[in-house]
């Protein structure tokens, strides 16, 4: 059995980040421990750049707004206006679906001349702060809404 057959559950582009070079077949428990060790390693993530910092700030702001909106929906459901909360969620979901489908349609109809490479180079994982920025922003938004500061922040954005 070759190395590819032993690690076939891992995509080729990510294989070098999770495993060392090995030609022998390993038992399943050793393979799982190697996979976990590769996922948990922090040294293999790329360092924060200026673009990553910008994306992190934007994700925190978006997460805070989403957290405030989620708390508002929870208040609607708790006050008995669950039908209004359902209508808002369905309208938001329909708008999201429309945006995704129209984006795919326009990409298919109006192709640009630049095509992605056939064999792209594997990229290291994003920095951990960038990955966790949206969930942290969501928690910040919920906490600000619990404290009553979400209305003040929305007034500043308006």
Image (tube, rainbow, N blue to C red):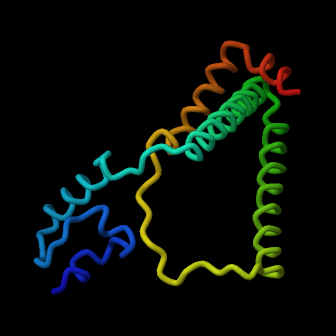
Residue at horizontal 33%, vertical 52%? 44
For the C terminus, the quadrant is top right
Residue 5 percent coordinates (x, y): 24, 83
Left or right of 87 on screen, residue 115:
left
Examine the rendered structure and indicate whether residue 21 appears above or below residue 141: below
Rendered image quadrant of residue 62:
top right
Rendered image quadrant of residue 110:
bottom right
For the N terminus, the quadrant is bottom left
Residue at horizontal 57%, vertical 43%? 50
Judging depth in this view, the residue of 152 and 20 nearest the camera is 20
Residue 36 percent coordinates (x, y): 25, 54
Left or right of 114 on screen, residue 8:
left
Judging depth in this view, the residue of 145 and 16 nearest the camera is 16
Judging depth in this view, the residue of 77 and 109 nearest the camera is 109
Furthest-front residue in this view: 50
Total of numbered circles in the picture? 0
Furthest-top residue in this view: 147
Residue at horizontal 67%, vertical 31%? 64
Left or right of 134 on screen, residue 132:
left
Rendered image quadrant of residue 80:
top right
Left or right of 49 on screen, residue 83:
right
Furthest-bottom residue in this view: 1
Examine the rendered structure and indicate whether residue 83 appears above or below residue 26: above
Residue 127 percent coordinates (x, y): 45, 46
Examine the rendered structure and indicate whether residue 54 appears above or below residue 150: below
Residue 71 percent coordinates (x, y): 70, 28
Does any portion of residue 69 appear in the rendered image? yes
Does any portion of residue 134 appear in the rendered image? no
Judging depth in this view, the residue of 22 and 49 nearest the camera is 49
């Amino acid at each position: 059995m070759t190395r590819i057959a032993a690690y076939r559950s891992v995509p080729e582009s990510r294989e070098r980040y999770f495993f060392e070079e090995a030609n022998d077949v390993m038992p399943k428990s050793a393979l799982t421990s190697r996979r976990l060790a590769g996922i948990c390693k922090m040294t293999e993530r790329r360092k924060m750049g200026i673009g990553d910092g910008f994306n992190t700030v934007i994700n925190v702001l978006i997460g805070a707004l989403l957290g405030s909106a989620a708390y508002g929906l929870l208040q609607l459901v708790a006050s008995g206006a669950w039908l209004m909360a359902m209508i808002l969620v369905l309208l938001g979901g329909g708008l999201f679906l429309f945006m995704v489908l129209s984006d795919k349609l326009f990409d298919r109809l109006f192709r640009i001349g630049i095509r992605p490479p056939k064999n792209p180079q594997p990229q290291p994982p994003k920095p951990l702060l960038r990955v966790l920025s949206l969930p942290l922003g969501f928690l910040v938004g919920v906490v600000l809404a619990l404290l009553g500061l979400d209305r003040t922040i929305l007034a500043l954005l308006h």
